[in-house]
Image (cartoon, coloured by chain):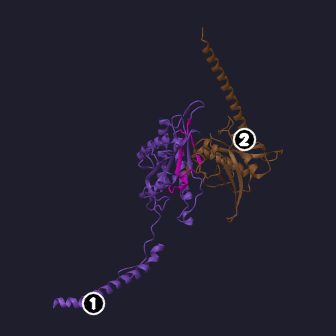
């Protein structure tokens, strides 16, 4: 009897279940499609409450801020790219790496976390676009590109020559070769802070604006630091390879970056009630 | 007493040496004559007597990263392309002087200069295309400051001589190149403007947002 009942009713039951599932799927699809445009545009849409009242949705997520204690160091060149020939025995790629290894502990001592684009001399060098991508991905407070030269005198602090743009009017998408334009005002302040501390350390400093890859591609406040020989008199000259000179410059720049953080990205509790400051930090 | 056959052998060898020397000398002279015959001595343009005129050269200084305008008298041809090339050669030749404040290696620097009007744009950009020689770029001192000063010096001088043009682009041996000598970007167009530079001095006032 039971077996006969199952044989006679099973196909009908299965069909009913299928219809029921199909109806549910259709309903879910229709309701999901109706709510999609509002979500895709990021506009606030009303959410139903338990009592039938309607509450406005929270505002869209703001632009991601930067990490106020994170610094990216980019020792330029490396691998097959030697950079400038600074003396008979030293090339730029080695000096930039040595200087980065001095600047790193100086920044850590100021409470920063430091990420470097290279810690050794790799066989295949990173392209400047790859370096910019690494830096942009971690959203640091500042990026410092390190160079060295055999010409000029003292320390050259280089910032982008791009004109500042307002991201509100320009939109969130920036051209790759003009990505720095949105933060160039902060980069100039960073360069100024580094210049002040270098002057305080009695080191000659020159503030230059130049288009140097990858500075224009960075979305964080960025400067390039170029170590040039230190000319104390017409005959005496300290080369950029000198460890003592590098240490003095590293200490001064670390102090300058810390001062930049104090002025431009105060700790979160300090911003409470003070309104939004440029570079509201995480 | 030296045997006769040894004396004959000795003088035969000396004769061979002299013959070979004469043969080599003749070969060298022939090769030299063939190489000099390859040099194109035909004149490119008709010789003209260009009058000297006063132009503004934007001269760079590495010591303080400045560029200042200097008036100079230069004989320039009338053809705009040749005129721009001569002007730039004149400017860059200044930097090969021993007392130059922005020392560059001597030698030819500019291959060609082209004037292009880009009609595809709304405001018809007038562009100067400077084709630098590869030897100039390869031997240029490497560094951000020194490379940027060279570019700014060229840009300022071109702007003073051709104020109707708005942009300048650089090629090296007819090809785009990412940087001049590893630092200053060459893969973008630069606006032609007065590039007289005096670097700013760091100030406490500029630290506040």
Q: Is A209 one of the magenta-colored residues?
A: yes
Look at the picture and state if B193 lies above or below A251: below
Where does the image place residue A96, in percent across and percent down from the top left? Answer: 49, 43
Chain A shade in the render? purple
Question: Magenta segment range?
Answer: A202-230
Observer-side mark, 2 or 1, equals: 2
Q: Colour of chain B?
A: brown
Residue B101, label in figure: none
Q: Is residue A181 visible?
A: no
Is A33 rendered above or below residue A130?
A: below
Assess whether mark 1 and mark 2 are in contact (beta carbons under 8 angstroms).
Answer: no
Residue at which label 1 appears: A12
For disc 2, the marked residue is: B38
Disc 2 to disc 1, how far (Cα)?
Answer: 99 Å
Q: Nearer the viewer, residue A276 or B18?
A: B18
Q: Is any part of residue B174 visible from this angle? A: yes
Residue A233 vertical placement versus A213 (above, below): above
Q: Where residue A167 sits: x, y (%)?
A: 54, 63
Q: Is residue A16 left or right of residue B107?
A: left
- Asked if A36 appears above or below A274 in the picture, the reply is below
**B65 or B11, which is in the foreground?**
B11
Q: In the orientation shown, which residue stands out farthest toward the front? A: B5
| Quadrant of res B29 | top right
């Amino acid at each position: 009897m039971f077996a006969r009942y199952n044989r006679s009713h099973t196909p009908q039951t299965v069909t009913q279940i299928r219809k029921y599932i199909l109806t549910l799927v259709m309903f879910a699809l229709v309701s999901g499609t109706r709510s999609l445009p509002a979500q895709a545009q990021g506009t606030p849409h009303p959410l139903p409450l338990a009592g039938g009242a309607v509450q406005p949705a929270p505002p869209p997520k703001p632009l991601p801020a930067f990490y106020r204690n994170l610094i990216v160091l980019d020792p330029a060149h490396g691998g097959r790219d030697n950079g400038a020939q600074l003396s008979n025995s030293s090339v730029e790629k080695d000096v930039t790496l040595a200087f980065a290894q001095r600047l790193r502990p100086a920044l850590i001592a100021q409470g920063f976390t430091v990420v470097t684009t290279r810690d050794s001399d790799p066989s295949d060098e990173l392209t400047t676009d790859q370096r910019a991508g690494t830096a942009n991905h971690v959203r640091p407070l500042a990026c410092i590109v390190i160079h060295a030269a055999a010409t000029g005198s003292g320390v050259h602090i280089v910032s982008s020559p791009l004109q500042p743009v307002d991201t509100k009017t320009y939109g969130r998408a920036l051209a790759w070769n003009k990505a720095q334009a949105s933060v160039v005002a902060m980069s100039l302040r960073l360069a100024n802070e580094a210049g002040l501390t270098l002057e305080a350390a009695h080191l000659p400093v020159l503030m230059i604006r130049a288009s140097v890859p990858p500075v224009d591609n960075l979305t964080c406040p960025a400067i390039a630091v170029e170590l040039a020989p230190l000319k104390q008199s017409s005959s005496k000259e300290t080369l950029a390879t000198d460890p003592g000179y590098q240490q003095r410059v590293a200490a001064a720049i670390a102090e300058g970056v810390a001062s930049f953080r104090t002025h431009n990205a105060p700790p979160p509790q300090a911003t409470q009630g003070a309104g939004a400051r440029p570079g509201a930090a995480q | 007493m030296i045997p006769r056959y040894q004396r004959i052998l000795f003088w035969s060898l000396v004769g061979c040496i002299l013959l070979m020397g004469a043969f080599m000398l003749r070969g060298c002279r022939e090769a030299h004559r063939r190489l000099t015959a390859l040099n194109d001595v035909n004149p490119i343009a008709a010789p003209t007597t260009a009058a000297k005129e006063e132009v503004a050269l934007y001269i760079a200084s590495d010591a303080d990263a400045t560029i200042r305008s200097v008036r100079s008298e230069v004989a320039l041809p009338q053809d705009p392309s040749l005129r721009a090339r001569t002007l730039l050669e004149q400017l860059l030749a200044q930097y090969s002087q021993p007392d130059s404040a922005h020392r560059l290696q001597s030698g030819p620097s500019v291959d060609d200069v082209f004037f292009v009007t880009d009609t595809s744009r709304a405001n018809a950009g007038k562009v100067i295309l400077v084709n630098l020689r590869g030897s100039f770029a390869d031997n240029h001192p490497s560094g951000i400051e020194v490379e940027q000063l060279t570019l700014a010096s060229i840009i300022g001088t071109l702007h003073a001589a051709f104020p109707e043009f708005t942009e300048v682009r650089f090629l090296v041996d007819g090809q785009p190149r990412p940087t001049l000598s590893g630092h200053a970007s060459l893969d973008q167009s630069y606006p032609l403007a007065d590039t007289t530079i005096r670097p700013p001095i760091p100030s406490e006032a500029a630290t506040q947002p």
